[in-house]
Image (cartoon, grey):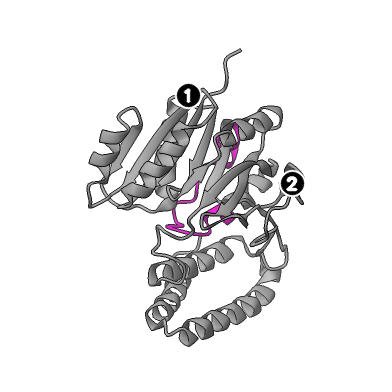
Amino acid sequence: MTLPQVTAVTLNWNRPDDTLACLASLKEQTYPNLQLLVVDNGSSDDSVARIQSEFPDVTLLAHPHNSGFARGNNLGISQALDHGADFVFCLNNDTWLAPDAIEQLVAVARDKTALLSPIIYYAEDTRRVWGLGGHFNHWLLEVRQIGQRELDQGQWPSVLVVDFVPACGLLLPRPILETAGLFDERFFMYYEDLDYCQRVRQAGWPILALTTAKMWHKVSVSSGGSDSPNERYWMARSSLLYFRKHARPWQWPLIAFWRLGSALRTSWRLGQRGRGDALRAYWRGLCDGLRERPL
């Protein structure tokens, strides 16, 4: 019996070393029917030449400018679907996988159509959990993460039913892509995964996290690192877009109160750390998110 075709899609933007390491990890996957596709998001360095040289059999889409995480992934997903992919596995280029990760994900997906994610660990602390999905707080539209920063000691079942999984490692079956659609490209960076999981659930599809499929993540590398001005700007801006898109009128008083408290806590933390550049970027992102055309 022919195995389903899986196309792994990752983005590169001026970080060829990370991308090459990610591709090397994908080359070690035990799943046999796997195609690799890289979308270069307008790199200004030698990324394209290096990727083509070291992995000539990998499909490379060289986009002329950095169009953001959602748009870049959508370009790759669309090409994968056009070329017959049954599943698209989207992953950040600052990640790597256990050799059987995709095989584990596909085995579950063939039995039950669902949005799937591996368990994701911190790269610098290889048994400590960065992401295992979570559940939405339906009053605040925030996510209560499962196991974040816990050491994995086998305390979770092999499959968890969740409301949310992060976009840095997602197995997307074709039926979900055809009904829930692609990522919302108005989210340049961050919150596109919360938005997408909301839409997948609204379309009636389950979301699962697998502890048998393992991934490691360097965390916020593409945005300049945690609490960098770039990361703070896009996190703030996208958060306002997300809440404006999904909040209902009865939720707004609670969300506004909660988000104001979060903004003040973030501002205090950045100020205490002497991160005036990140603090200014954060508030600029909030203002831009408020001014943005309603989603």
Q: Pinpoint residue 90: horizontal percent, then vertical percent.
A: 49, 42
Q: Amino acid at mark 2?
A: Val
* Percent of width and height locating residue 154: 74, 49
Residue toward you, 203 or 62: 62
As for residue 76 lying within the magenta part, the answer is no
Extent of the magenta region: 175-195
Q: Nearer the viewer, residue 116 or 196?
A: 116
Element marked by disc 2: strand
When the figure is inspected, residue 167 is found, relative to residue 251, above or below; the finding is above
N-terminal of the pair, mark 1 or mark 2, is 1
- Residue 41, which numbered label? none
Please give the name of the residue rendered at 44% of the width and 58% of the height, measured from the top-left corner.
Answer: 189
Q: Which mark is residue 84?
A: 1
User: On the rendered structure, is 172 left or right of 8?
Assistant: right
Q: Residues within 10 Å of mark 1 (few under 14, many from 20)?
A: few
Bin the neighbour count of mark 2 within 10 Å (Cα to Cα): few under 14, some 14-19, many 20 and up: some
- State the residue position of label 2: 161
Across and down, in percent, residue 181 comes to 54, 41
Relative to 8, say whether 131 is above or below: below
What amino acid is labelled 1 in the image? Gly
Residue 11 position (above or below residue 234): above
Magenta-span inclusion, residue 193: yes
- Depth check, mark 1 against mark 2: the one in front is 2
In this image, 179 relative to 63: left or right?
right
Q: How many marks?
A: 2
**Which quarter of the figure has residue 169?**
top right
- Residue located at (59% from left, 80% from top): 260
